Structures are given as C-alpha cells and as structure tokens.
Image (cartoon, rainbow, N blue to C red):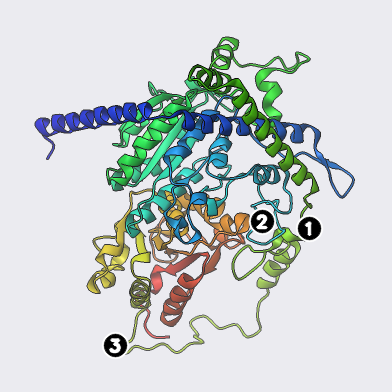
Amino acid sequence: MRQGEAFLKRRLDRLLIDLTLCMRRIAHYASITVENRLEWQRRMIRTRLVDEELKDLFANGLPTPDGGSFGGKGFRSTWQEGVVACATAMTRAVDLSEENRHNADIVAPMIRDMGLALAMGQTPIEVFSAQMGKAESYMDGGIQGSGGRDLHIGNWEKGILPPTAPLPIASATTTGVALAASRLGVSRFHLAPVGEGCSSSGEFWEAMNFAGVRGLPICFMIQNNQIALDTLNSAQSGAETFGDKGHAMGIPAWTIDGSDPALFYASTAVAKEFATDGCGATLIHVETMRGCGHAHHHDDLYLGASSGNPPGYVDRELLRYWSEKDPLPNHRELLIKLGVGEQKLNRIQMEEEGKVESARSQLEKMEWPEGNSVVKGVTSISDATSHEKQLRRIDGAGAISSTSLDSGELSIEFSDAPNSWSYSRAIQNGMAALADQFGNQMVFMGEDMEVAGAFGMNLGLKGKGHQSKLLDMPLSEAIIIHSATGAALGGMRPLAEIQFGGFAALAMNPLVNNAAQLRWRWGAEVPMTVRIPLGAKTRSGPFHANMIESWLTNDPGLIIVTPSNPQDAYDLLIESHHLPDPVVYLEHIGLYGLRGG
C-alpha cells in the first residue's frame, strides 16, 4: 500500500544518501596527492599524443600490400582526457596475478574513453593496431594473426570490455557482468560510461532499470558532449540534466565538471564504495565537450575546414568556453602551483612522446592480416562460409526428397506409456540436470521465472531445490539477453528465456550484434543458451505464434537447435549448454504434450 508518510520517509532516505555520498566525494577529493596528479598528467598526455597519431594515420594512411593506402577509422578524446583518473580508484587487472584477475574491476569505455582504456592498462600499440586493422590487433577472434576485424579498442583480459557501434550494448552487457559478480559473491566494481546520445536508447534505460532493481555493483556515467554526432542536446532530452535520469531508476546521481580529473577520481571512488558495500548502482553525469568531430572524418563538418568550406556548425562561444577548460594545460598549471618543477613535467612529456613514437614504429612494421583469416572462429564448432556456399546450401535444402514421408506418417515410434517423458518434461529434466551439474554458475533468467515460468516449465527446478537459481527479469527482452551475455562473460552459464517467438524481435540487437559476434570479434567464450517457445498452428494469433527460424539461421555466430521429440529435447538442451557459444533453443509449444521418441 502506498502511504504519504512512507513516501516522505523514502524521500528523506534518498536525501540522506545523497548527502552522505557528497561528503564522501569531498573526503576523497581532499585525499588526492601530488603523486596522483602526476600520474593523471602522464596518462592525459599519453591519451592526447595517441589521439594525434590516430588522426595522422587516418589522414595519411599506411601502404597496403595491394599498392594502395589505408588509414582506418577512429575516434578521439580531445578535452575529455580527465576520465583517466577513474582508474586510480579501481582495481586494475594488470596489477593482479593472472589467477586473481577475475577479481579486477571492469570498465566498458565508449569512443571518447580511450584515456580510460589506456589508464586501465591498454597499450598505445593495441589502440593503433585496432584502428588500422593490423594482423596483431586484439580483434583477432582469438586466433593469432587474424586481427583487423573491428576498429574498436578494448582488452577483456585487462578488464576493458570492447565497445560496439550500437551504443547501449557495452553498458547493458556490463550490467550482466555485474550480475555475475553479485551472484557469485565476487567483490568487483563495474564502470560503464556512455555519451548523452546513448542515454536516449531504450536498451540503456533497460540496463539502468535492471541495475536499480537488483542493486548491482555498477556505476553508469553519462558524458554530456553537448552534441551527439550532429544532434544538439535540445533534440536529445527534455531532462534538466542527464543526471536526472538516474533518479527515475531509483539510483543516486550527481553532476561533475569533466575538465577536472580529480572529480572523476573522487566520484569513481565513492561509486565503488557504494557498490561494493552492497548499496547498488549509481550514475555520474559529466558536463564536458568534445573538442573534435564525432570521428576523424567529421572534424571539418564540425569545426570547419581551413578553406572555410564547410564552415563548421558548432557554436563558437561554446567552443571557446570549453577550449579554455582543456584539462591538460590547466592541470599542468595546477601542478606547478603545487610545487612540481617544469623540468619534471617536461621530462614526463618527453617520456610519453618516446613511448608513443615507439608504438607508431611498431605498428608500421606489423603485418596486415591475410584476407581469408576473417572467416575463422565464428563459433567453437564452425568457421563462416562464403555467400556462394550459403546460397547453394539453401537451394539444396529446397529439393524434395524421394523418400519424404506422407502426411501423418512418422519415422520415429512414439510411446504412449504413462511413465514416458513428454517433450515438456524432457526440457524440465534437462534444466534440472544442468542446475545439478553447474551449481551456482547457473542462472535461469527471464520473465515470470520465480513462480512457475511460462507454461509451468520451472516447477521441476523448484521441486528439486533450485529456486535460488531462478531470476525474474524486468519485462525487457533486450536486457534479458544483454545481461545474460554479460553474465556469461563474467563466469556464469546463464539459461535465458524469451517467452514467445514473436518477442524475440525485441532481443535481436543483443542476439545478433552482441552475443553472436563476441567470439568472432575477440575470441570471447559466451556459454549461454536462450530458450524460445514457438507457437505455429497453436491458434495463438500474431506475436505468440511466430516461427522465427529464418530470422536467426543465417547468422553464423549463433547456433540454432530445434528439437522435434522428447529425446532430442533433452539431449540438445544438455549439449547446447555445454558449448562455449550462444545457442538458441527453439521449442515448439504444440509438442509439449508429445511422449516418447
């Protein structure tokens, strides 16, 4: 029951939490040492220098084996380098022994956060080889020398989740990694920055909502770049600040000045305290501005070309204001006021210039990938095939066999014995067997899971003592699959459920742009099964009766299984869940009562 007195008490509790977090930020800010600031200056210099080389590579390119030139495509972080200080508040994987790296904190940088990736341990050569698509880039499908598959940065072994072009994927996936930490009892913190444009995405809202509901150890960060590609804030959101979006999800939020690295540090430290103390998610809203185009090719349209055509559209007064807040010269000036000699700062500058120049030289000597390497490692059991072979396979599948069965004729003998398994019982027993085998690594996640599940399919799990492995998700198909993908990356073996085939349309982005591509992009194992009941000829009408095989079977990164009888239903579920790949398990509602076979 909703009562006014209880509502006011909750509002008071929220106010006290906000005040406490504010005081903790002040305390962390006051604890900052000159050594911290020197490290931030070094990391910001490194970021700016790498950015400059990335633009030079784009503009001038490198010679390719076919006699041409290639410069890649990429993004820069001009005026947004202060994010490097977040790493000081975090446990970095590169600082831990290999056997303890699963305890390291996780970051999910987006295209303005190269400085954060570098601060967490990524190297300039990794960044260069990603943009240029060289053979030794991290985006190699886990196959040595097969790099060049994706221009994005990141290194999962260093706790840096590679970003994706569909913006909310990284933050939504990180929510699943945080879910794994929560369920496995790992004291790990997760930081998911996005731009203000991404905060308009429904999947980002789904991620924040899920994190708020379950109190997950994650901090979202919305960086207000002032302009998302070419879309102004006035067309992006009607909220007073982007931090207000956190309050709608029931999570504490606050705003910082993105030109001050110390505020990034203090805010991240407090968010980590809050998360690892079991208090849940937070949101940091960063007021900042990108001092460059959306990507390298966009600079002239955004800022204006030297010729005056195009003239540039960004507001000059806004640009002047943020240029005067450039964190590199301002932070250097602060260090001098704090007693650091210019000679020491100059030495740091020269050291970083040497490292970046060395990485550039290493890049130029690195081989280009062999063209056919791109088809390797799509799943653990197959490589990709050519379009020609795929078309031949489809054409051959349409041929009518001379041994086809007549209508109503069966090739399998089915049992009508009362103790024989039905199709639905086989699935239930398969899920129970997986719960027994994988223990706390298992989570059964979807809508309406904890009472019985759609069609009562979870009653067997409850009857065998696996109630704790059932997880009710918000009615948001995309976050079900994104977070299951993240949970798989985080050490679990999730079995997700989309209630009906038609609803899988809402999960297509996480299925085909996220889960299906992770092994091919960087060799990730994603041990996840997605159950989807189908309903053709069940008189269920549209949306509940869609047959969706054709939506998915042409995606080489997904393994699709469709059991036709109880024995296959059990065997295929067990075998699917033992694969280190995303498997879509299509079960027909009309077969649930079928026995034997």
Q: On the rendered structure, is 209 left or right of 141?
A: left
Disc sitting over residue 419 in the figure: 3
Task: Determine whether, in the image, residue 47 is placed left or right of residue 585.
Answer: right
Mark pair 1, 3: CA separation: 57 Å
Residue 392 falls left or right of residue 12: right
Please say if 38 is above or below 104.
above
Is residue 338 in sight in this rendering?
yes
The label on residue 370 is: 1
Identify which residue is drawn at 52% across, 50% down.
94
Amino acid type of the residue that numbered disc 3 sits on in the rendered structure:
Asn
Q: Any mark on residue 260, and which?
A: none
Neighbours of disc 1 within 10 Å: few (<14), some (14-19), many (20+)? few
Question: How many numbered markers are drawn?
Answer: 3
Residue at the image point whose x is 70% and y is 61% from the top: 375
Which amino acid, mark 1?
Glu
Sequence-wise, the earlier of marks 1 and 2 is 2
Element assignment for label 2: loop
